[in-house]
């Protein structure tokens, strides 16, 4: 019988586990990719959320059981846009969806953390967009929290320029997230992504050296 991720993580409680977060448009993916290039074992919760509802998974079966076959695309995969439309204006349906997905996502993240820790003395970083909003520090036992930060106006401009979103949609998303001040107050390390890519690279390398020193 496979070991439960929570029990396995308890065995490595002294192992530094880093949470990384930031608001929409902050550049979390860019920073985490650079850390992975430097040698970090990175787990992206957004990718995990996609993986737990891939065709053939228990997660997809549970979603279909609750919402019906209409949430499936023609190839049998989850129609994310269609599902989002279904739950967007229905708080009860959204609550049901979260009740299905969140435990699966957390279990899979913890499983991957254990695998990363088994590889040796390499910083393990979990990227969670809503880290503070979901009490993730306590649930995962993060040793330190990294916040990727920039002024909201710059974030809005970058998201509008790079994604199919209007300024209003970006600001609506921001309202649902922790405030910038709240994120900064909970940060152990802050990466300022308001300047050039060269400045960002320099900060990430400095962060990497600090994280490695924890081992």
Image (cartoon, rainbow, N blue to C red):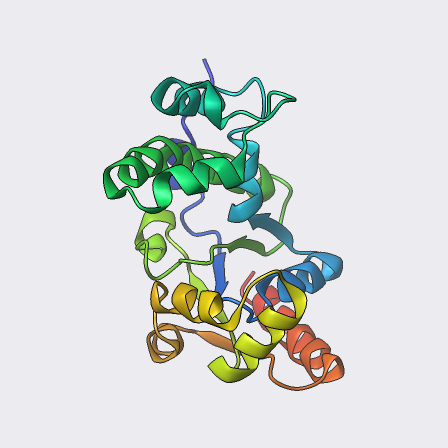
Question: Picture quarter containing residue 207?
Answer: bottom right
Give residue 133's position: percent from left, percent from top. Answer: 32, 59
Can residue 112 be spotted in the picture? no
Number of dots carrying numbers: 0
Residue at 45% of width from left, 44% of height from top? 12
> In the image shown, does 86 or 26 lie closer to the viewer?
86
Give residue 51's position: percent from left, percent from top. Answer: 57, 33
99 up-or-down from 32: above or below: above
Give residue 100's position: percent from left, percent from top. Answer: 35, 30
> In the image shown, does 213 or 142 lie closer to the viewer?
142
24 up-or-down from 65: above or below: below
Quadrant containing the C terminus in the rendered view? bottom right
Residue at 31% of width from left, 46% of height from top? 89
Of all residues, the one furthest to the left in this rendering is 92
Of all residues, the one furthest to the top in this rendering is 1
> In the image shown, does 105 or 93 lie closer to the viewer?
93
175 up-or-down from 206: above or below: above
155 up-or-down from 117: above or below: below
Quadrant containing the N terminus in the rendered view? top left
Can residue 82 be spotted in the picture? yes
Give residue 68's position: percent from left, percent from top. Answer: 41, 20
Question: Picture quarter containing residue 32?
Answer: bottom right
Residue at 61% of width from left, 60% of height from top? 164
Question: Picture quarter containing residue 212?
Answer: bottom right
């Amino acid at each position: 019988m496979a070991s439960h991720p929570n029990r396995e993580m308890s065995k490595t409680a002294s192992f530094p586990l880093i949470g990384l977060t930031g608001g929409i448009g902050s550049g979390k993916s860019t920073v985490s990719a650079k850390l992975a290039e430097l040698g970090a074992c990175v787990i992206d919760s957004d990718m995990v959320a996609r993986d737990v509802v891939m065709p053939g998974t228990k997660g997809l079966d549970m979603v279909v059981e609750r919402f019906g076959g209409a949430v499936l695309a023609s190839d049998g995969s989850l129609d994310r846009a269609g599902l989002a439309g279904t739950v967007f204006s229905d708080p009860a349906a959204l609550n049901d969806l979260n009740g299905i997905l969140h435990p699966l996502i957390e279990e899979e993240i913890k499983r991957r953390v254990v695998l990363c820790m088994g590889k040796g003395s390499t910083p393990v970083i979990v990227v969670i967009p809503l880290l503070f909003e979901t009490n993730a520090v306590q649930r995962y036992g993060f040793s330190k929290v990294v916040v990727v930060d920039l002024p909201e106006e710059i974030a809005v401009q970058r998201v509008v320029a790079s994604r199919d979103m209007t300024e209003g949609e970006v600001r609506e998303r921001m309202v649902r997230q922790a405030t910038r001040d709240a994120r900064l107050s909970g940060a152990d390390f802050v990466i300022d992504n308001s300047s050039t890519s060269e400045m960002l690279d320099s900060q990430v390398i400095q962060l990497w050296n600090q994280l490695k020193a924890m081992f």
